Amino acid sequence: MNRRDFIKRSTAGAALALAAGAAKRARADDANDRVILAVMGIRGRGDFLAQEFAQRKDVEIRYLADPDSRLFEGRAKTIEKITGKRPQCIQDFRRALDDKEVDAIVMGTPDHWHALGTILACQAGKDVYVEKPTSHNIWESRKMIEAARKYKRVVQVGAQNRSNDNVVEAIEYIRNGGLGDVHLVRVLNSKERETIGKQPDKPVPDGVDYDMWLGPAPMRPFNENHFHYAWHWFWAYSGGDLINDGVHQMDIARWVVNQKYPKTAVSSGGIYYFQDDQETPDTHAVNWEFDGLMMVFEQALWAPYLKKTPLELRDNDAIPNWPFNGTRVEVYGTKQMMCLGRHGDGWQAFDADAKPVFTKPGQFSPSNTAHGGNFIDCIRSRKQPAADIEELHYSTLLCHYGNIAYRTGRKLHIDVATEGFKDDADANALVKRSYRTPWTVPEQV
């Protein structure tokens, strides 16, 4: 080998070595820069969120936590298929809180676990993505805010409309005076749900840590209707569809109203269709009075999904399936009115002659992906997320006020200073729950 060939080969070898070293460092930097997540509650929404976050190259799903270990094998396989790495499966989520490398908890638990799970995560120095609604009751929601602020944590609520460009543009249209003065906002929650039937109490299934599942809720015998999805329809764990799916539309409506508290709340309804085990109403109406306007919520859980195609698109074959469906918000102004849908339903403004003056065609905006991305970005930037816990606290309050008005059967007057009620001991007794030791939401977070 002559001198020239030696120098060329040596230079090429050095370049390859440098490139290999750079690639290795880049891979290490990528791994070090990943946001490490633990997912708490993995049956329904939590499973969806785990898969959504797993799609990101800058995220590692390290733990899947759920009291029902029967879910572990299938859920872990799904994440491993997406990422190439199998997450650890644990029944006690607190093991993930003890892992100093975990950056955040993603919570898809039943509502009665939202507050305590969020507070414990904040205390452990973790950021939190918690599904809607913020809490089981009014007092808990305020404690979640206190924990987020005290420990300087990012707490994003799963109100995906806050990351939906369609909804943001509709709010801007209203803010800019497109509708004139708004005095009525109407929220519709029409859908056809299945009955949960009647179930007997029975022994706890093998593989289920039932004490962990109940957590802050009262002890009672195991029952399939008080477990997994059916928990939505019992006061011990949630508050029916007003606070389950309705809170999405309620958040849009309160965004339109741009006020924190109503002055009064009154409600009526009942279980008119489902003669089964559920406690919460299948037919429900609530009125909230704000300064200068009224908000109305109407729910029918036994009705086929309502289809209302925008006028100018009824005969447009190019957009055959663009309905404002049974979950929508109607905003009535002095100049125009608006039909506003969530997710990909779009929105449309009408003039006094019922002619559409502005149409934002529905497009299935990837609001879930954008919302999760906003959370990951805020973990890095330390900015407040799109659906910060305090902003969604006020929207969730409306649902709590509506349910408490329903349960007490009278008009309630809101005490802004306490976020409870004026001169109403029965209503104020529902502001906070009694906790089951040791699953207690602390007075001092």
Image: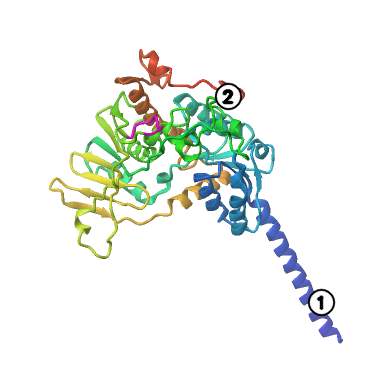
Query: Which residue was labeled with disc 1?
Result: 10
Residue 440's disc number: 2
Q: Quadrant of residue 42?
A: top right
Point out residue 249 in the picture as x, y percentages from the top left corner: 35, 40
- Label 2 element class: loop
Point out residue 134 in the picture as x, y percentages from the top left corner: 47, 34
Point out residue 319 in the picture as x, y percentages from the top left corner: 28, 62
- Asked if residue 277 lies in the magenta stretch, the reply is yes
Q: Is residue 122 visible?
A: no
Residue type of the residue flagged with mark 2: Thr
Q: Which residue does the image show at 82% across and 84% down from the upper left?
A: 4
Q: Is residue 280 left or right of residue 237?
A: left
Q: Quadrant of residue 329?
A: top left
- Part of the protein shown in magenta: 276-282
Q: Report the quarter where the C terminus lies.
A: top right
Q: Is residue 12 visible?
A: yes
Name the residue nearer the viewer: 7 or 239.
Answer: 239
Name the residue nearer the viewer: 178 or 267.
Answer: 267
Mark 1 / mark 2, whichever is N-terminal: 1
- Label 1 element class: helix
